[in-house]
Every structure is written in structure tokens, then in C-alpha cells.
Amino acid sequence: MKYNYYFILGSVLLLASCSQKAEEKSSLVYPVTHKVDTVDVYFGTEVPDPYRWLENDTAKATADWVTAQNEVTFGYLNSITFRDAVRKRLDELQNYERISAPVKRGDYYYFSKNSGLQNHNVQYRKRGEDSEEEVFLDPNTFSEDGTTSLAGMFFSQDGSLLTILIQEGGSDWRKAVTMNAEDKTIIGDTLYDLKFTGISWKGNEGFYYSRYDNPKGNQLFSRVNYNKVCFHKLNTPQSSDKIIYDGGLQNPQRRAGAYLTEDERYLVLTTSVSTTGNELYIRDLADPKGTFIPAVTNFENNHSVIDNDGTRLIIRTNLNAPNGRIVEVDVKNPAPENWKDIISEAEEPIQSVSTAGHKLFVGYLKDAKSQIKQYSNKGNLEREIELPGIGSAGGFGGKWEDTDVYYTFTSFTYPPTIFKYNISSGKSTEYRRPQVGFNPEDYETKQIFYTSKDGTRIPMFIVYKKGIERNGKNPAWLYAYGGFNISQTPSFSASRIVWLENGGVYALPNLRGGGEYGKKWHDAGTKMNKQNVFDDFIAAGEYLIAEKYTSSEKLAIAGGSNGGLLVGATMTQRPDLAKVAFPAVGVMDMLRYHKFTVGAAWAYDYGMADDSKEMFEYLRNYSPVHALKPGVAYPATLVTTADHDDRVVPAHSFKFAATLQENHSGNNPVLIRVDVKSGHGSSNLSKALDATADQYSFAWYNMGVVPPLAKGDM
């Protein structure tokens, strides 16, 4: 079949001023996307799929289409006169030293540092807290174009050996390299075809990891065969690795992982078929003839072994406790009927659990804000840890022998600051605070609660520069996620300050589908309840407009991945709500998402079109690709994706953009920006700043706003 989709750009108007009317902004000529006569039948209903050919992301025809689309998109973006000023200001604010909390491994403290604008954080180490630091690994040297990065470092218990995971071009695939930590010499062969795995060392003999068989060709129907958990013995080829668990071809969607307890006696195996719920098995490695003992053999809830004290296992679970609880059980009889609560379910959901110094540090969420409590490993509450303010805290992990741990605290205008915490006294001492070129006192954060369509009370953070008038004229950025039990909590972004300092409002609602209020909140935004998520987001926008933080003409809606789906569904259901839409790496074809890479694992949240006629009709109703209608004026839209995204494959965004350009009526531009050598996120800092500059410029321009930085008023 010959694809006749080449186009004539003609003369693209160079857009010189935001004072131009909307009618003058859209003299764009989009690439003509060829259509095919592909039709699927679901329960007797025919569903055309005219852009099916774009799913073949390795085909020359698709590559040519991407090139043509990018020519139009970057021609438009480059013509926005203040775009370079936006990019420059992003560099200025991002150019500050950033350091991670140190972790002790063997004789060294390891930490990452970025001098400011380095594409990747550099790994450092020092023998003592006050000793000279040295560069340990610099991922900026991994590739000439800066798109290869360090995706993880995993040390043996004594810290003498480590395995690093390497990511190329933003892909989810990893390769593993093992090193001697002291002299950084490489040991043995490189391991390949790793995906969604950790590394768990057994002494200095070798380590457990999980792998797939790498798919060949394009990503369609490449369900990565099946998952295996293996043990790699050092200085042996990967082909001889011992298979510990094999899902088998009869369970192609089952994923597995394995890790050891700190004393390395017990091997914990988890298996899952979705992003929610897992089986749990335990194996006593002290018994040469030991096999895996089943603890939980269904996928209805989430469970993990967080520590052990001899034969006593400590397990985190949400079985019979939607907000989570911590239980103990003897390893010989680990079934749930033998579990005993040591930390019972609370009103606030458990967000995290870490261990150090034979203590349990349990992170709770109170209306999407962190609370950290310290317990003995018997479950006795010792104290609530005093945090610097309202925000997000993480860390508190260490070894049994540690007397101090580190944690990081951050909020919207509070850059990530590291604290050293003494376990016995409960005293926190500031360890490292970054110096960012802005004044936090110039900004205000408030948390409000608004009412969704069905009366549900939804929290939302709103951030803005002090002194702005609530007159409906402020550009506002409404961002959300709403899925997969993921909680959206306060965090700092230097890039976001650029939006705020130029008079913008930033709003983050905690939609159903997330984990902010536990499993019930998550389930209220899944499957046949998914519309609740879109209703919550729409109601957030309506609140900002009603309270005059902004207006429809000054509102941008944004989200990525599942949040990209959120934006796609919102702009198709309420095209009048916002002036600008940014669906990023979104799940846009809800009838076929499960046919790509690991897509079937998302079925707990979405359901599948093959499940039932009711599920098919529900999905088709909100699926962004299928919900677009001819003759509708949609918001100014910049769809973003990347050529190496093998999680939410770019075909979702390709098909959505092609359908949007076909159906859109009106003068708003509807464009797609395809990044190269990036994946589900930007593969380096420079690419991330480029993307942000394009989004901010696109938003301000289409809102008719000239940001102060463009006028030299900063």
C-alpha cells in the first residue's frame, strides 16, 4: 500500500506578537495523514481504525509522518518570539547545585550531585561525612549525545561490589554492569533484556534479578514474552543464570520480582498480573532443599515483606485494611489467617514504610501531606517526627546498625532539603539546603477543598505569587494524574517557578484514582468508575474559574501518561473548559492499549474492551481517540510523546493527533511534538528544559499573554 500523506507547508506565518487575534494565529497546514479501511468488531459493533498504520512505529512511513509533523510543530514554536527568553530563564533557575541524601555502603557514603545544568546527576562518594569527596560515576560520559543514563545502583551488603543499571535513549529496557566498588573495575559480562527490575545481592556470590525476552520488531503485540526471575552468579555468562521463577508462556502477563531480607536468609518472591495486587512467596535459603512457601496466592491486594527478626516476618499489606496496616507472622506459617497486627489501619493511608536501626518509619498521608511516625519493630509508637512544614518527606532508610538516617523534605516553594535524623533522640538537623535563585517568601500555597459532580470533596493545592488579583485574568496551569494508586503530593520544581514568577497560577488537585486516601479512593477512579476522575478534574477547572483565579481563556490543562489520558478525555468532553491542552505520553486508544508492551498490566485501573460489552462501551465512550467529533473547536493542543517510549507507545499520541487534526474546527493550533532519543520521560535535562520552554511558550502565546520576562520586566 502506498501512503500519500506528504503535504505542502506553504508559507507558515511567523507569529510576531501575542496581541494578534486568534484568527491570525492559525494559518497552519497540517500533514495529510493517509487513512486505511481497518475495522474492528466488538460485540457486534464495528469500530473503524483508519490510522492503524501509525502503530507500526518502526516503519519508514511512520517516521516520515513524524518528520512532517515535527516540521510544522517546531516551525510554529520557533516563531514565538519570546520562546528563547523562556528557555534562558529556565536555565537560570535550574542552574543550582542539587545533592541527594547520602547512603552508607561499606566504608563509603554515596550521594549524587548536579552542578546545575548537567544532563545527568554525577555519583560521588567519601569515606566519612567530613572527608574529601570524589567522583564515583559520571553518567554524562556514558554517551556523546547525553541520552544514556544511570538507572540504578545496587550494592552487596558489605558494599564491596555493585551492579549498575544503564538506560539508553529513554527506553524502559536496561542492561546491567557489575563493578568492584573500590577500584571500579568491571566484573564479568553485561546482562541484557532487563525491565522493571531491582537487583538483590546474595553475599558477594551473585544477585537476583528479573528479565524478559526482548521483543523484536515494533511494539505492537510484543507482550515481551514472559517474565523470569534469575540468579546471576558472578563471572558466568547470562545464558547460564539459574531460573528461580518462570511465569511460562501460559502466563504471559505475569510479572515477578525477588528480593532478600537484610540478613539474606529469606528470599521474597512477588508475582502480579497488574499494577495493583500481588502474590507473595517466601523461601528459606538456610535450607538447601527449601522451596517457596506461599503466603498470599491471589492478586486482590498489595503485600511486601519489609523486615524480619529471625523467623518473624514483618509485612505491609492492605488486605482487610484499605488504608494499609503492618502485621507480623512466623515464616513457617505465613498465610494471612496467621497474621497479627502490630500497626493497625489508621484514618490516614500508609504511603511508605522504611527500616533503620531496628525501627520502622511509617509515612502517612494527611490530606496529601506527609506525616512520619517512628515505631519499634514490635509496632510500639515512639514518636511522630517533627517536619519543617507542610509538604512531602521521604527517606529514613538504612541498616540495622545505623544510629542516624537521612531524609528529604520539599514543598512547592521549598527546594528539596536534606536532614540528618538521630534515631534515639528524634532530633533533625539540617544537612544540606540548595540555593535557588528565587525568594520563597514571594509565593503562597493554599490547600482548598472543592466539590465534584457527585458531591465528593476533593482537595487541591493552589500556588501563586503573593499579590496577584483574583480577577479571572491570570494564566493558570491545572495539572493532575488520577490513577494507579499514585499520590500527588507537594514537590519543588525550579521550572515551575518560571510559570509562577510571570504571574501564573499552578493548581494540583488530588483526584480519585490516586492513593491519597487509600484503596477506596483508588478504586473509586477505576474501571466503570473512571469517569469520576474526569469529573473531578473538570470540577477543579470550574472552581478556579468560579473563584476568579483564572478564566477559560487563560486556563491550561496538563498531565502525562495516565494524566495524558485525563487531559485527552477532558478536552473531548469539555472542549470549552480550557484554552490550552497538554496531553503528554497519554494512553489515548482505550480499546487497544492492552495490546502493546506491558499495557495489559493496566487492566486493574482501566478494564479491557474484550471483557464485556458494557466495558467496551464504557471505554469507547471516553477513549480520547474515539471521542473526538468532527466540527468541534478544541483547545489549542500540543500533544507530546517520544520515539523511544516503550511504556505508553507513541502510537497512542500519533493516532490521537491525526484524528484531532482531521476533526478540529476553529483557529486554535493542534500540534504534536515528538522528541527523539527520549522515552516515557525526557532522556536528559536539556531535553526536559526544551520541552518545558515549548509548553510555557505555547500556553502563553495562545492565551494572548506576554509574560513579563519577554518584556524585560523580570
Image (cartoon, rainbow, N blue to C red):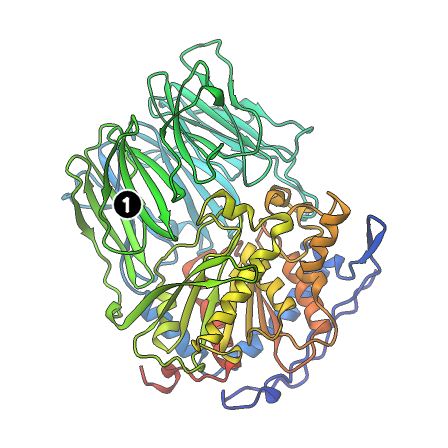
Q: Position of residue 222 (x, y in %)?
A: 67, 42
Q: Nearer the viewer, residue 532 or 18?
A: 532
Q: Position of residue 174 (x, y in %)?
A: 50, 41
Q: Nearer the viewer, residue 290 or 633?
A: 633
Q: Quadrant of the N terminus?
A: bottom right
Which quadrant of the structure image shows residue 471? bottom left
Q: Position of residue 320 (x, y in %)?
A: 49, 32
Residue 289 versus residue 367 in the image, above or below: above
Residue 424 versus residue 444 in the image, above or below: above
According to the picture, the residue beneath numbered tag 1 turns out to be 111
The amino acid sitting under disc 1 is Phe
Residue 59 visible in the current orientation: no
Q: Quadrant of the C terminus?
A: bottom left
Q: Residue at x 47, y 39 (%)?
A: 322
Give the number of callouts: 1
Identify the residue at the far front of this view.
Answer: 455
